Amino acid sequence: MRILLAEDEAELANWLIKALQQVDFKVDWVNDGRLVRSALKDFRYDALILDLGLPGRGGHDVLADLRDADHKLPILILTARDSLSERVTTLREGADDFLAKPFELAELEARLIALIRRSRGGDHARYICGPLTFDAGSKQFMLKQILLSLTQREHAALRALIQRSGEPLSKQELVSRVFSDEQEVNPEAIEVLIHRLRKKLAGGAVQISTLRGLGYVLEGS
């Protein structure tokens, strides 16, 4: 799952990026409220962690702007302003959840997963495409009730595809989700991963199709 973090405290942001990556989140960071909308145009994020005290454009203005534009992205407010009035105000403005600093990473992770799950209309962190299922809790893929053996990068690529099942993901989007910790990646690396995944999914009534000019899409048959 890919998260956009809007936070101006560099030390906290760097800690969050590293910590969330350990639990399979990919995190992009902006430190100015004016950069949020442009970042959202570049990628389809699963959630936004939004600090209220941002420079350039405050969190309240960013939140109002996104909701006025009917942006459905789940938004979790992360702030030191821990008061009842602040909580009520941000929730009324369209925030989906509110977490005060300081906080425990485990709680942040749980709240993010719950937000993303609710935004997708599911009661369980479980994704299905034909006979292929992915359980976010166990982090396991099952194809026709048989556990799939995947490398770390194969797992990341297939996870990105099943989370957007039926929707195309561009090669660049897959690169950003699979190789987010690396500076330069040859796009052909994604082609190799897709080739491997197609072999492992062969005969399983689920396939990765190539849509010219759009990218790859996971489809069940």
Image (spheres, rainbow, N blue to C red):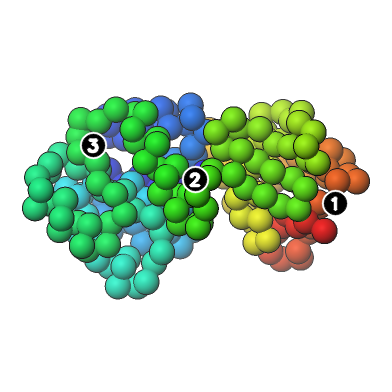
Who is closer to the viewer here, 48 or 84? 84
Q: Is residue 155 left or right of residue 83?
A: right
In the rendered image, residue 82, in percent from the top left (x then y), is placed at 12, 41
Quickly name the residue at label 1. 205
Callout 2 amino acid = Arg
Q: Is residue 81 above or below residue 216?
A: above
**Front position among marks 2 and 3:** 2
Q: Earlier in the sequence, mark 3 or mark 1?
A: 3
User: CA separation, marks 3 and 1?
Assistant: 47 Å
Callout 3 amino acid = Glu
Q: Residue furthest bottom?
A: 69
Secondary structure under tag 1 reads loop
Q: Residue furthest front?
A: 123
In the rendered image, residue 147, in percent from the top left (x then y), is placed at 76, 31
Residue in view at x 59 percent, y 44 percent? 126
Secondary structure under tag 3 reads loop
**Front position among marks 1 and 2:** 1
User: CA separation, marks 2 and 3?
Assistant: 20 Å
Q: Residues within 10 Å of mark 2 (few under 14, many from 20)?
A: many
Quickly name the residue at label 2. 2
Residue in view at x 50 percent, y 49 percent? 123
Who is closer to the viewer here, 212 or 97? 97
Who is closer to the viewer here, 179 or 122? 122
Q: Is residue 12 left or right of residue 145?
A: left
The circle drawn on residue 9 is 3
